[in-house]
Image (tube, rainbow, N blue to C red):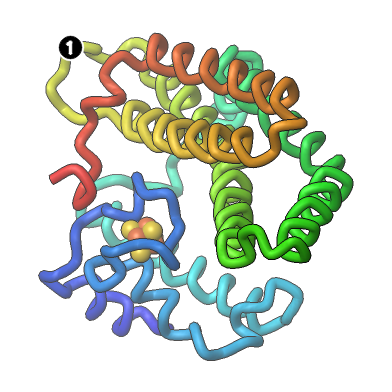
Amino acid sequence: MDKQKLLKLAENPNHILGIYNYCNRWCERCTFTSKCLNYKMGEEHSDDSEANDINNKKFWDQLTEMFKITLELLYEDAEKMGIDLNAIDTKEIEKTEKVLQQKTDKHICATESYKYVYMVKKWFEAYPEISKSKQDELIQQAELEITSTDSVKEIEKIKDLIEVIHWYQFQIHVKAKRAIHGMLDNFSDDDDSDYPNDSDGSAKVALIGIDDSIAAWGELMNIFRSQENEILNILVHLERLRKTIEKTFPKARAFKRPGFDD
Ligand code: SF4
């Protein structure tokens, strides 16, 4: 994509400004694809398997090209605003950023959401065994002709629930960290300002990921009864994390995500 094409896409009045900043990035399941600039930009190469393959040179060439265009536009906009980006003291910024990153990593929302990533990983390491016993059970039911249609539906449902859990497994941590980072960075800003805060938006996305994950785990627990204790342990952890994020970002739930909450 060249600069002119990108600018033309950005001019489309049907697009919702910044919708992609607070979504869950699950474009496959999104109802706003026609209103999303980010989606449209990706669409250009959607049929090009090489451009979508992270192991292919074309993918990285495309990313480099996008980086150059973005940087070019950034410098142009900064100049219009009277900002000289070359005059920025990058060493000082790097130093501040390092401290900020360390504080972010140690925050309870970051450590606990990271812990969740590993709890999920651990549960799924044991999943082949768990799944095998469930499959044996379903096969047995099918052989006895008890509920063959329900068995197929149940297998599909399990797949769907697992997809939801995996989708949010890392995203909750990433969004929680972004929220903390922003909060610490703006520590001295006016907290009572009416201006929507990016930290609250990121925290809201993390919370939505937690809500959906809790629902998915709850359904999995009903399916895999033998896993009740293990899943309950994960659910308790998620619920604690949900409360901690809500307490840290009391305005997050009320944050209006462009498009989704309008
Ligand atoms: S708003 Fe929807 S289409 Fe756009 S990036 Fe997010 S999930 Fe994808």
Residue where numbered disc 1 is placed: 192
Q: Is residue 132 above or below residue 194?
A: below
Q: Residues within 10 Å of mark 1 (few under 14, many from 20)?
A: few
Q: Is residue 65 visible?
A: yes
Query: Where 188 sits versus 167, above or below?
Result: above
State the image coordinates of residue 61 (x, y, percent, origin top left). Answer: 62, 79
Q: Quadrant of residue 37?
A: bottom left
- The residue at 60%/31% (across/down) is 94
If the image is split into quadrants, where does the C terminus sit?
top left
Q: Spot the residue most to the bottom.
A: 47
Under mark 1, the amino acid is Asp
- Does any portion of residue 99 appear in the rendered image? no
Give the residue drawn at x 75%, y 61%: 144
Q: Quadrant of residue 62?
A: bottom right
Quarter of the render that holds ligand 1: bottom left
Q: Which residue sits at x=34%, y=75%?
A: 40
